Image (tube, rainbow, N blue to C red):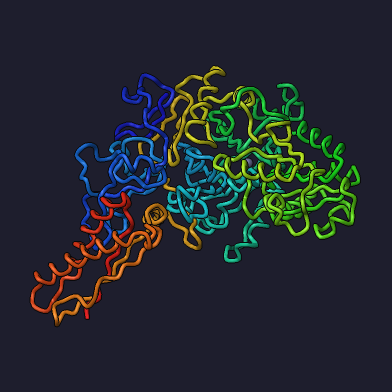
Amino acid sequence: MNTNTQQNSGPSHRVGNKKTRPHAQSKPRTDAPTRAPATTSSSAKPTQGQNRSRRPAHNGAQRPSRPSHNRGSNGPTRTKKHLHPAAGGKVQKRRPFHGSKKHVDRRPVPKIEGETVRVIPLGGVEEVGLNMCAVEYKENIWVFDAGFQFVSEAEMPGVDYTLPNITYLEQNKHKIKGLIITHGHLDHIGGIPFLIARLGNPTIYTRNLTAIMIKKRMHEFPNVPTLDFHVVEPNDTMMIGDLEFYFFAVTHSIPDCIATSIRTPHGNIVITGDIKLEHKDGIPVPGEVEHWAQVTKEDNIMLLSDSTNCENPGWSIPEPRIHDNVDEIIRNAQGRIMIATFASQFRRMIAFMKSAESQGKKIILEGRSIKTNLEIAKLAGKYTPADGVIIQAADIDKYPSDKILILCTGGQGEQFAALPRMARGDHKYVKLNNRDTVILSSSVIPGNEISVRNLMDLLHRNNVRLISYKTSDVHSTGHGNQEELKWIINTVHPTYMVPAYGYHSMLKIHKRLAIETGMDDEHVIVPDNGSVIEIKGKDDVTVLPMKAPSAPIMVDGFSISDMQHTVIADRQLLSSDGIFVTVVSINVAKKQMQKSPDIISRGFVYLRESQDLLSQARGIIKRVTEEQIRNSDGNRIDVETLKKQIHKHLERFLLRKTNKQPIIIPVILVV
Ligand SMILES: [Zn+2]
């Protein structure tokens, strides 16, 4: 089934009924699931000093981080000029772009009717992160997860993270009956402090550890209203609003994960959150099977499941194997051991500490998130080390080196984290030597390849024994591989399946897996952020042609908005081509320039070596200004026109001479 929901207006896209499906729907989608750059309209009027023409195509193509304006939308007739967003041009929202904009149905989502149940993924189905999904029925909306996503500097310079777009929820705030949080990872809870007040501060339904993690984080956000928690336990059944919810435990890399089965009039909707399976040689352990015992017996109309690892064949490495392997390394080490792991790998962090403690070793915690998570583990009753086991780094030399285990952050090579500081020799108390063993109990997050490689090189320069997930089983993913995902589909046996939690490409692969389990192609729906899936009956599931707003919200310092695109586009230009400011003073009475124009530039060219360029640029500014003065009417100078003229001529000249397009700002002083 093609799941493109961006078709023109027309009948809803019926899922699972070939006869009534519009013919056009059967075409596979060919567009690439890339993020759209911030594009600008070419029809708006230019204003002073901000418009610029396109860089020659051969050049722009080599600069992936540059926002490439006009791309793709206007076809061959597009004008050569485009407008910088600051020029007041209509700015397209920066958002994942899945097809021709011509086919986007921009009508608002209509009101829900009758017994219809809606499933609306608002984030996390076009990316890994910013997870949020809404389920709507009559006068009820339940929201699942409120995550954020870290973004790369190249893509969105200066932006701290992005959040799901909650416009649809804000418009229907009165209906929100609860926020269900599946587990405590930031891509599921990170958005709460920014969004909860805008959602009307609904009750948060989650398990104990997750509640503690959310509360702990709220200390950093004193202005957020006090949160209302309802702690749920596995196998709890409860009414929330008009429908019954059944919660059940699932396995992931953090304890207290919860999945939900919502009992709707059309069957249950099962939402897993992040998930893997505890198994032994590909056979789920009895405890795992027990988790799913109730769900497998019931009538499930729809399953939303984790796609993160659907590209990996077979079964994931069982977490206990990691614990056993590291336990053995800790036991056999002759010197100190440093283990870098994600603080979010809660379960593993506790297992490593237990290992060290049972072997009579002292533990040093280096890194704020690791210390915080030990506090949380204590509060949640998951683990409390015996007195004296945790020691301060300053006391490291008081103990024999084979009695020391350091749990630290920095496995991704983060510049200021503990392990990279040790590797550089910058750590105040820990100086590495050839008797140390360093374990990188983490995988490389895409985008961090170079910093991890640099870290590994630095560690080897210290002649430590380095063990990473590449050389032995010291890291396992928290997300199920293909055979686990298939097992889940077979166990839930849903009528419809919605791959979730992942990039579009992952969702599509997950769809293929679902088909391998015997599901009908038409019954697997790959949504976009904002897609509105409507369930009206067992054989009546449709995807509406219109979508809920889905452009991610950007958190940029204290500013939180989905309208930051112009600022981001400026930052990208500044970072690639710099800024060029010229100050022109004109004596109107004398009808002449006061002095030679001043030029200030940053990040553009090295001025000392560019005197020739600057004097030519001054010549152009002078010529343009004198021409404007000559054409001026009496004692009045048209400053706006002069700015535009200077901008136009300078831009052309600088592009020709340097192949760069700095932001040009002419400043005119009239005296
Ligand atoms: Zn997770």
Q: Answer yes or no: is residue 387 visible.
A: no
x%, y% of residue 204? 61, 51
Front-lying residue, 82 or 174: 82
Image coords of residue 630 (percent x, y): 9, 71
Left or right side of 320 for 446: left
Quadrant of the rendered structure where residue 20 is? top left
Res 579 seen here:
yes
In this rendering, would 18 be left or right of 400? left
Task: Give the image location of residue 102, x and y in percent.
Answer: 28, 38
Q: Is residue 566 above or below residue 138?
A: below
Q: How many marks?
A: 0
* 581 is higher (above) or lower (below) than 320: below
**What residue is rendered at 32% in x and 31% in y?**
11
Nearer to us in this view, 299 or 590? 590
Which residue is drawn at the image coordinates 66% and 36% (left, top)? 478
Q: Which residue is rendered at x = 42% and y = 26% of the image? A: 15
Choose top left, top right, bottom left or bottom right for residue 326.
top right
Residue 369, relative to residue 330: is it above or below?
A: below
- Which image quarter is the C terminus in? bottom left
Quick check: 3 left or right of 474?
Answer: left
Quadrant observed for ligand 1 in the rendered image: top right
Image spot of residue 411 (x, y percent): 67, 45
From the viewer's perspective, tell me whether residue 413 is left or right of residue 634. Answer: right
The quarter of the image holding the N terminus is top left
